[in-house]
Amino acid sequence: MENYKTSCFPTWCPGCANFAVMTALQNAFLALNLKPQEIICSYDIGCGANMGNFLKTSAFLGLHGRSVPLAAGAKMANPDLTVLAIGGDGGQLGEGGNHLIHAARRNDDITVIILNNFFFSLTTGQASPTTPLGIVSKTTPEGSGVLPLDIVNLSLVAGASFVARTFPGKAEHFTGVITKAIKHKGFSVIEVISPCVTFSKEYNFAYYLQRVKEVKTSCETADEALKCARMAKDNVPIGIFYQLEREVFHKLMLKQVGSP
Ligand SMILES: Cc1ncc(C[n+]2csc(CCOP(=O)(O)OP(=O)(O)O)c2C)c(N)n1
Ligand code: SF4
């Protein structure tokens, strides 16, 4: 585990879900016997993205919302690397929403980890694309009136070949899903429900612990997965909803244009 730690201690608030996320990633790397230099993680800007300072792998910290295209480029340049793109719901679905959709269509062979805390947290709690209806935040003092995006649904519709949701409060599930997503050949999206202890007063750990329900088997079709992953007020399904390998983008390009 020590091999995957830098000398910087995380600056996250005590109790932040990002601590558990980083430990799960370290456990997954260890289980897969990956050396830090065999992995590249790309990050953007935000509390979650600050992980690039604490998790020891090769890394690139880019602009907000741009972790996915950086990861896609790294995989294209060196397909032997294990490539992850890590960032918050604000960056991955707001500034970077277009990148997520088109990388899913292409089936870039990367693992995208979306740390969904339902807010732009680093900038102190503004509403993000996943903020639930009615939630009061700095930018929605009367309560958010804008429909939230569902990360799992969006990824399925865009064509992601591995789609999962997990929760750090269920440590074994969490590490298992991350390990399988990294092993999957193709575009994997993991929505990590990671409540922000500082700005998400209502949707906190206790709220999700009571509501998460594990879905045991993945669905045969994306249509079925859409139904099985749907969140309701008292039901937050977690699990691998869909997994189907198809040709990855760098192999398609090699076939069509040959090696450089
Ligand atoms: C293009 C761009 N837009 C806005 C910002 C300002 N900004 C920096 S961090 C941040 C919030 C990050 O939120 P999120 O991506 O959800 O990550 P979190 O901090 O919640 O983990 C924002 C809006 C920026 N740096 N660049
Ligand atoms: S503000 Fe929220 S997301 Fe950011 S470090 Fe603190 S608890 Fe974590």
Image: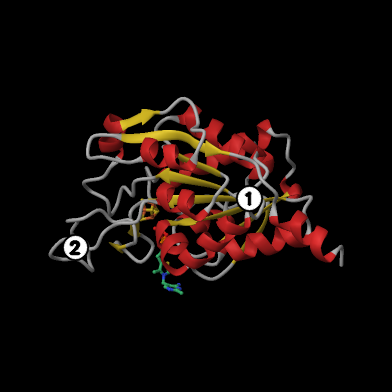
The Cα–Cα distance between marks 2 and 1, rounded to whole angstroms, is 42 Å
Give the quadrant of residue 103.
bottom right
| SS state under label 1 | loop
User: How far across and down, in percent of the image, does residue 174 sit?
Assistant: 49, 34
Q: Amino acid at mark 2?
A: Gly
The correct choice, above or below, for 134 with respect to 62 in the image is above
How many marks do you count on the picture?
Answer: 2
Give the quadrant of residue 143.
bottom left
Furthest toward the left, the residue is: 142
Q: For the N terminus, which image quadrant?
A: top right
Q: Amino acid at mark 1?
A: Thr
Who's the residue at 20% across and 61% down the image? 144
Q: Which residue is mark 2?
A: 145
> Within the displayed image, which quadrant is ligand 1 positioned in?
bottom left
Tell me: 238 left or right of 49. Answer: left
Q: Is residue 227 shown to the viewer in this render?
A: yes
Within 10 Å of the Cα at label 1, are there few (<14), some (14-19), or many (20+) other Cα atoms? some
Q: Is residue 166 shown to the viewer in this render?
A: no
Within 10 Å of the Cα at label 2, are there few (<14), some (14-19), or many (20+) other Cα atoms? few
Who's the residue at 30% across and 57% down the image? 148
Tell me: 164 left or right of 67. Answer: left
Q: Which mark is residue 198?
A: none
Q: Nearer the viewer, mark 2 or mark 1?
A: 2
Q: Which mark is residue 6?
A: 1
Decide if ligand 2 comes within 8 Å of the CB at mark 1: no
User: How far across and down, in percent of the image, does residue 17 sit?
Assistant: 41, 44
Q: For the C terminus, which image quadrant?
A: bottom right
Q: In the depicted view, which residue is nearer to us: 124 or 9?
A: 124
Label located before the other in sequence (2 or 1):
1
Tell me: 45 left or right of 197. Answer: right
User: How far across and down, in percent of the image, does residue 176 sit?
Assistant: 55, 31
